[in-house]
Amino acid sequence: MGLLSLGKPLTWEEIKANNYHEHVRRHGLIQFVNLYNRLKDRPCDVLKWGDEVEYMLVKLDHKTKSAKLLLSAEKVLPVLQEHEEMNPNGDLKTLWRPEYAAYMVEGTPGKPYGGLMAHLNTVEANMKLRRQQVIELLNKEEGETALSLTAFPRLGCPNFSSPSYEPDSTDEGVSKSLFFPDEVIYPGHPRFRTLTKNIRKRRGEKVAINIPIFKDINTPSPFVEKFTNDYDGESALAAKPDHVYMDCMGFGMGNSCLQMTFQACNIDEARHLYDQLTPLCPIFLALSAASPLYKGYVTDHDCRWNVIAGSVDDRTKEERNLEPLKNNKFVIPKSRYDSIDSYLSPNGERYSDIDLILDEKDCQELMDAGIDRQLARHIAHLFIRDTVSVFAEKIDQDDTQDSDHFENIQSTNWQTMRFKPPPVNSNIGWRVEFRPIEVQLTDFENAAFVVFLVLLTRTILSFKLNFLMQLSKVDANMQQAQKRNAVLDSMFHFRKDLRSCSCDCPIEKEQCLMSVNTIINGGPLGDGQGEFPGLIPLINQYVSTVETDLDTRCTIMCYLKFISDRASGKLMTLATWIRNFVSEHPEYKQDSVVTDQINYDLISACDRITKGDLKVPELVHIIESKSSNDIPNSIKIAQDIK
Ligand code: ADP
Ligand code: MG
Ligand code: MG
């Protein structure tokens, strides 16, 4: 979470009455044009990159055997940010930001990593340091801890937080949720509550998330939830049978993830990387699957994606095609949190086969200002969304200097990939952000995903690999990736020949169905279609061509082995491990219910795995990598860096 404007937030009613949504749209587009024209020819930037990890603060009450989300972010965050406050341009090791929930904090490295292979050996150590910094501020005797857990299993169940609050399910409440009290939203910044309420108000009703329940032998059929406090019957209407129903932003934005940002050498490379990483999003989602439990139930999904997409879905009934268009301009197929809808590089154009919803006038305005059609369409598509967060102090801006209105729309389009222009008045270049990965319990696993992705981007650029395939197939893969045990049981559309730019055959023939194992480790494609080389063998080829110190090489090998074993099934995903834990728990009644006791035992086990006190060889290898907080002096000297 980068930009967090401070000031007085306006309600959706105020935004609409004053037409501020149109104001933000008009000026946001102009600001993008100015930014683009100023920065499109930025000379060569170097590779920089960084990760973001979101942590949940948790309290394990060993006496009552309950695990709760600890609403202490507002207390620990100022302490975590002290160094930065006192030393904004100093040599910081870590940076801390608020997140949506009062039990979350987000940590990043103090400054982005650079192009040295040796940087890859510092990621895990930095993640350890971040975790240590949070844990130090918690009260261990009281069972307080910090977990990098994608979804808290009993989020939204009675008394799931510490302290505990009652939800306010009247229209006066922010989210009107039957399950998620407004006090659980991070109170330190008005943005989060306002976004929550404005999304609900714009939609015209509460958001409605329905995730299929995992039907165990004793699960009622049909499975129908009963609600108390559903005063107007809205939830009973929105909840689908045989699904777990959730009704507010917190169920999605209160989940944690692992994101990565890469700075490209120029805008063209950023557009290329954006496209090339897009088909990899569902594969990373399936590989990192970590979240099968929601609101105290076992679901049939392994990932958070659809939950978050639904949690901020501010489309009206008209936009969701449930009523004829009258007050709105478009029928919009997806939530503002979802997979991307168009490619950005010239080669990507023919694979952009999704109907791109946009306002032709906006698109024309951008093209008239000198922006090419593909980029103009991308930006115009982002701008079909209304702003849901306006601060009174930020309405009138100098469009030649500010970019707040542009950032406003850009940063509330939460997609699998984000194309990030350089911020105004900074030395930062064109970047892309990779956003699908589910966060893992241990620093080792998270570092492995990060290093794997960094090396993959280097391999793509060095070997000029081509992953492009139809976006409609990428979307199909996104849904496939979330299914139970998709990493082993699902097949994914994927490009067969990574070395060719395009062939003469129809584009459907360039791809075929593959398992994650084939994609990651390589193997025969069947039907005489030849061999797929596999991402890890390709990365190994790349690594063998670059000079790497021994410790870094050793660390890289550990990480690649881990990813390879997750793909082949030698190691299980966290989602599978959690499912097994629940189904083998003595208190589990094969009824899809995760009780307080199961939750406590599960979260305690997760905490011990995180800290290295519980070794689970079927989940993660029992090896220590050689990650270290500093780059050895010999390398610094050889590379002439300080
Ligand atoms: P978000 O858009 O998710 O709010 P931020 O702009 O706060 O993200 O940046 C988050 C990530 O980007 C961090 O991992 C940080 O290390 C990394 N980062 C910062 N500067 C750069 C840069 N110039 N190039 C690439 N990554 C960067
Ligand atoms: Mg975040
Ligand atoms: Mg981010």
Image (tube, rainbow, N blue to C red):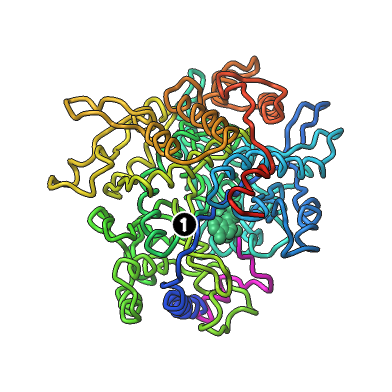
Does the stretch in magenta take in 320? Answer: no
Q: Where does the image place residue 579, in percent across and percent down from the top left?
A: 54, 24
Query: In this picture, is 466 found above or below 192?
Result: above
Asked if residue 7 is among those painted magenta in the image, a careful observer would answer: yes
Residue 375 image position (x, y, % from top left):
35, 67
Could you say which is closer to the camera, residue 108 or residue 412?
108
Residue 507 appears anywhere in the view? yes
Residue at the disc numbered 1: 432
Counting the numbered discs, the total is: 1
Identify the main secondary structure in magenta.
loop
- Determine if residue 231 is in view: no
- Stretch in magenta: 2-19
User: Measured along the vertical axis of the image, is residue 99 above or below residue 85?
Assistant: above
The quarter of the image holding the C terminus is: bottom right
Q: Residue at x 16, y 26 (%)?
A: 528
In depth, the one of 391 and 521 nearer the eye is 521
Residue 179: image x %, image y %? 63, 45
Looking at the picture, which amino acid does disc 1 mark? Val
Kindly state the secondary structure of the residue where label 1 is placed: strand
Q: Is residue 440 left or right of residue 544?
A: right
Q: Quadrant of residue 374?
A: bottom left
Identity of the residue drawn at 40% across and 25% down: 488
Q: Is mark 1 within 8 Å of ligand 1?
A: no
